Structure formats: structure tokens, C-alpha cells
Amino acid sequence: MGTSLASRIHLVIGDITRLAVDAIVTAANEALRGGGGVDGAVHRAAGPDLVAASRALAPCPAGSARITPGFNLDARYVIHAVGPVFRDLTEDAATLASAYHAALQLCIENDVDHIAFPCISTGVYGFPKDAACQIATDTVTRWLGQHAVPSAVTFCCFAAEDAELYRQRLAELGIETQP
């Protein structure tokens, strides 16, 4: 893996549905039926075919992920990653890391070169944002240190305050970003 870790990780503030990447991740529910927050936005932007495609792959337990076409999105695929509803940091941290890991594994299986992640489980699922950020960045950087695929990962934060958490955590890991 000749490329540096820092050149493979990007941070943006904005709408994940507008990114031109191979796959965008949505913070899905176990029934894969769409919902609020980022999952609702992804379903609206992808169009009604996404609902049928994702429901056909349900259920998807917390810590797992499924992949569908992107339909009306610029992204070729949507990866539906199910994070935990927050109850206990110790148990839920492993489940959240597993959701990121499962999404990254789908990159290998589906020739996904560039993936974009939202902040999984930090909305209505209530996962503390700072802990979720650390889990996301640690899981992704560990994966990228061991795998050539994907060649690029974008953390897409809808809110500037979330992006600042990611910027600070990535800086602690020696990765400078410019959101």
C-alpha cells in the first residue's frame, strides 16, 4: 500500500447524498425501511426503488451492513450500516465498530474504491458524538492500515460541530484535514 493513510482520508461538511463517490453509507435501521435523519435523506434522494431494494435485504442486525444500488444518486451504491441504539458504551462501542467494519468489507466484495460515511448512531440512536467519532476514525484508520480497498474514505458530517470532532480526532492520529 504505497499511499499514505493521510492521503486516503477526507473530511467534508455537507449532504452525503450529493457526493460523487462509489458508495455512500446510510445510518440504517434494522428493517432497512428508511427513516429520519441521514437515512431518510438518502432514501428521498435515491428514489422509491431504494425502498424495495433495501427491504428485500432486511432484516439487518445492528453491527451489520447491506449493499444496494444507488439508483438516482451519483454514488453507484448505498451501504446500509446499522449502528446500535445507545444504551451502554462498552457493549455498544463494539457494535458500532462492527457496523463500520461490515461496510468496509462490502467495499472489497463490490469493488468500491471510494466510500463516504456519515456519523452513524449519533442522531436519534443517541450515541455520544465524541465516542462515536473516536470509534469511527479508529476503525477506519485501522482498516486502511491493513487493506488497500477502499483507496479513499470520506467522513461526511452534516454539522460543522461534528466535523470539528472528526478534524480534532484525525489530527490526534496524525492526519490533517481541511473541512
Image: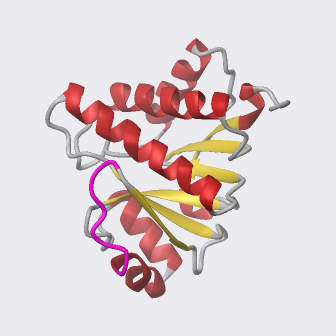
Q: Nearer the viewer, residue 49 or 59?
A: 59
Q: Is residue 58 left or right of residue 21?
A: left
Q: Is residue 113 left or right of residue 129?
A: right
Residue 60 in magenta stretch:
yes
Residue positioned most to the right:
2
Q: Nearer the viewer, residue 103 or 22?
A: 103
Determine whether 95 is above or below 81 in the image: above
Determine whether 57 is above or below 83 in the image: below
**Does the image show residue 23?**
yes
Q: Where, by quadrant of the figure, is residue 16 drawn?
A: bottom right
Q: Main secondary structure of the magenta part?
A: loop
Which residues are the magenta region?
A: 56-63
Determine whether 119 is above or below 56 in the image: above
Q: Quadrant of the N terminus?
A: top right
Q: Residue at x 30, y 40 (%)?
A: 95
Residue 155 in magenta stretch:
no
Q: Residue at x 74, y 44 (%)?
A: 151
Q: Is residue 152 left or right of residue 171?
A: right
Total numbered badges shown on the rendered structure: 0
Q: Residue at x 31, y 33 (%)?
A: 94
Across and down, in percent, residue 27 comes to 38, 55
Across and down, in percent, residue 157 comes to 50, 43
Q: Where, by quadrant of the figure, is residue 70 drawn?
A: bottom right
Across and down, in percent, residue 10 comes to 67, 37
Q: Where, by quadrant of the figure, is residue 59 drawn?
A: bottom left
**Does the image show residue 15?**
no
Across and down, in percent, residue 62 comes to 28, 51
Q: Residue at x 65, y 31 (%)?
A: 146
Residue positioned most to the left:
87
